[in-house]
């Protein structure tokens, strides 16, 4: 773990494990959170990105209000992995630029105790290398399946397909510095996060 500045904590785990729930608890404890999903959503709707996507894929990827049609984009990248990589090459540098600006400001803010990367592809796009430590949120596959079924209307096949496109969970778990279990309620998760956060701060 580097000792420069404030600790930068990565959150990892399977789809539906509760990574964002863990990040929100850390925010309540005084951490600032880089929400990669939110930054991705904002960058996808940046005028120059919308114009490029329209040039690539036509008017069908733009909603009537001028924003991107995320469902249409999901269908394209699901069927053509090379188009997903093309999209990532366009959007990821923009997200990193935004994130770097946020992190720089938070490092200078005395009210911020730590910085958290809440990014679904923490390992896949190399963001783990920017972290001082990683918390892995562990949850049984049945629990995760039920959560994404309720929150996203996903089937078990959807969950399996998307996870198969990512690095194995065992690899991520094995690389983590801390493991918390999220099979029950948020209070149980909170107690674990509080303990881990205290350990991170005391060792930094």
Image (cartoon, rainbow, N blue to C red):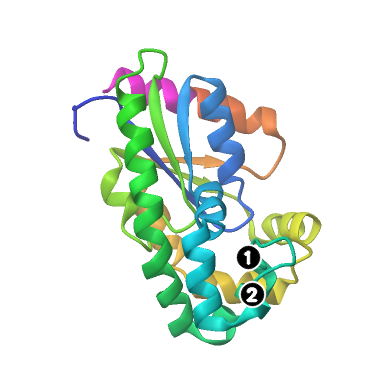
Q: Which of the pair 23/97 is nearer the observer?
A: 97
Q: Decide if residue 3 is on the left or right side of residue 48.
A: left
Return the disc, 2 or 1, that comes first in the chain's sequence: 2
Q: Which of the pair 128/185 is nearer the observer?
A: 128
Question: What residue would you read off at disc 2?
Answer: 61
Question: What residue would you read off at disc 1?
Answer: 68
Q: Residue at x 67, y 73 (%)?
A: 158
Helix, strand or loop for disc 1: loop
Residue 35 at x, y percent in the picture: 51, 43
Residue 74 at x, y percent in the picture: 62, 73
- Count the numbered circles shown: 2
| The image quarter in which residue 135 lies | top left
Magenta segment: does it hold 127?
no
| In the image, residue 60 above or below residue 126 | below
| In the image, residue 140 above or below residue 32 | below
Q: Which residues lie in the magenta part?
A: 195-204
| The image quarter in which residue 109 lies | top left
Residue 132 at x, y percent in the picture: 28, 38
Specify few, some or many for label 1: CA neighbours under 10 Å numbering under 14, 14-19, or 20 or more.
Answer: many
Q: Residue at x 72, y 60 (%)?
A: 65
Residue 84 at x, y percent in the picture: 47, 76
CA separation in Å, label 2 and label 1: 6 Å
Quarter of the image with the C terminus is: top left
* Prevailing secondary structure of the magenta residues: helix
Q: Residue at x 53, y 45 (%)?
A: 137
Quarter of the image with the N terminus is: top left
Magenta segment: does it hold 203?
yes
Q: Disc 2, disc 1: CB below 8 Å?
A: yes
> Which numbered dot is residue 133?
none
């Amino acid at each position: 773990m580097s000792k420069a500045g404030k600790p930068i904590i990565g959150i990892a785990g399977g789809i539906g494990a509760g990574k964002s729930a863990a990040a929100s608890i850390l925010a309540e404890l005084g951490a600032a959170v880089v929400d990669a999903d939110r930054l991705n959503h904002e960058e996808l709707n940046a005028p120059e990105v919308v114009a490029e996507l329209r040039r690539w894929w036509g008017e069908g990827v733009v909603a009537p209000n001028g924003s991107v049609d995320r469902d249409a984009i999901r269908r394209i990248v699901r069927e053509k992995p090379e188009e997903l990589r093309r999209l990532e090459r366009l959007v990821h540098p923009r997200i990193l630029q935004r994130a770097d600006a946020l992190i720089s400001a938070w490092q200078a803010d005395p009210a911020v105790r730590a910085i958290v990367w809440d990014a679904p592809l923490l390992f896949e796009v190399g963001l783990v290398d920017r972290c001082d430590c990683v918390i892995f949120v562990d949850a049984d596959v049945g629990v995760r399946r039920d959560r994404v079924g309720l929150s996203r209307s996903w089937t078990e096949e959807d969950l399996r397909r998307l996870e198969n496109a990512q690095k194995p969970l065992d690899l991520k778990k094995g690389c983590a510095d801390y493991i918390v279990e999220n099979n029950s309620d948020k209070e149980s998760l909170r107690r674990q996060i509080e303990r881990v956060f205290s350990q991170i701060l005391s060792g930094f």
